[in-house]
Image (cartoon, rainbow, N blue to C red):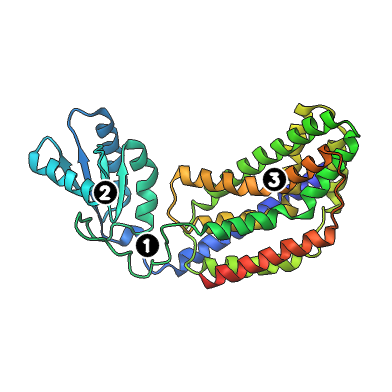
Amino acid sequence: MENNFMKKTFAALLFVAAIVLGVSFVGSAHSSVDAKDVHQCIYFFYSKGCHSCVEADNYIKTVEAKYPLLEVVRYEISNKTNYALLIEFYNSRNIGTYRWPVVFIGNEILPGKEEIQSRLEPLLENKTGWVCPSPNASVPPYPGDEQHSEGTPIAVIAGMAFADSMNPCAITVLLLLIAAIGASTAGTWKIGGAYIAGNFVAYLTIGLGLFAFLHQFEMPAYLNKIIGGAAIALAIYTLFSKIPAQSRPVVKKLINKSTTAPLSFLAGAAISAVELPCTGGPYFLALALMTQYDMGSAEVIAYLLFYNLIFVAPLVAVLVLWGRGIAPKIPKSHIRIVSAALLFSVGMIILLI
């Protein structure tokens, strides 16, 4: 039975992956101009005696080979004129600490080898730098690509997270776990807390993996409309959602084995993966939305931590109430209504932004 369920879960994940690939190919088909066919320009400031500068320059040379129309203007800063230009660029961006190697592309600054290696190609793919950078004027986005915004709408991400957190699947499993623990307050805090921690860590890890996967593809300009419509459709589905029948024996077995904190942590992590078809809709939509915005690695991690803290907040609330001797009675229908209302609202917002 378990092997059959795992096969079905794996098949479902492959189906989701196929959808993502299909969307990405549709997006590529509708993209009027490939980034490699666009003349782009970057300014690269470096020092001769700098080891990281040499590594950054070697990396940039590999990028030049991929982008035939890329113009790289190199400035060696032992030259006083070049150094003055570097300072002018930094000062125009209100940055008082001068670092090199550094790349200026469009309105973006990539200080240090790591920033250059992690962000240069994604920016080129977004057609950033279609004109050479200037310290005195901002560079407009490439015509037709104005949909790439500078900041992710945090309210929309929070709405997705709250809708996800109110999904009855995760709350139901926690209530079953606490009921299995018994009346011991110490056991409730210890095992219940470990379960929530496992849930948090696994869901965060899944999110990082999915975001990295989605970020490989060029999504269509109208992806926001797809996400908004999908959120509204998901809101309707949420009204009738429940733990899939085929996964219930697996969930029950994991709960029964959660007799210690480490086992409970592992159970929380495993159940996060098992529940993904039930709880993962808003998460997937939030991650797809995040790929539409220019975000560094630290910002991606911060948003996913923010999302997952909201996701586990109701679980923490249930655990606190039970730990204080209050057995919460949560009508599943009410949870579904709240989750559906949040998703519907978020979907409408996304359609409008």
Quarter assignment of residue 209 = top right
Q: CA distance from mark 2 to mark 1?
A: 33 Å
Can residue 62 be spotted in the picture? no
Amino acid identity at mark 1: Asp
Quadrant of the rendering where the N terminus is positioned? top right
For residue 312, the mark is 3
Count neighbours of disc 2 (C-alpha within 10 A) and say few if under 14, some if 14 to 19, many if 20 or more. few
Count neighbours of disc 1 (C-alpha within 10 A) and say few if under 14, some if 14 to 19, many if 20 or more. few
Circle 1 sits in a helix, a strand or a loop, which is it?
A: loop
In-image side of 4 versus 42 (left or right)? right
Outermost residue, left direction?
A: 80
For residue 34, the mark is 1
Amino acid identity at mark 2: Asn
Count neighbours of disc 3 (C-alpha within 10 A) and say few if under 14, some if 14 to 19, many if 20 or more. many
For residue 94, the mark is 2
Residue plotted at (91% across, 34% down)? 182
Image coords of residue 271 (percent x, y)? 76, 42
Mark toward the viewer: 2 or 3:
2
Image coords of residue 160 (percent x, y)? 63, 58
Give whichever of discs 2 and 1 has the lower sequence position.
Answer: 1
Residue plotted at (18% across, 44% down)? 87
Can residue 81 be spotted in the picture? yes
* Residue in front for this viewpoint, 27 or 163: 163
Q: CA distance from mark 1 to mark 3?
A: 41 Å
Give whichever of discs 2 and 3 has the lower sequence position.
Answer: 2
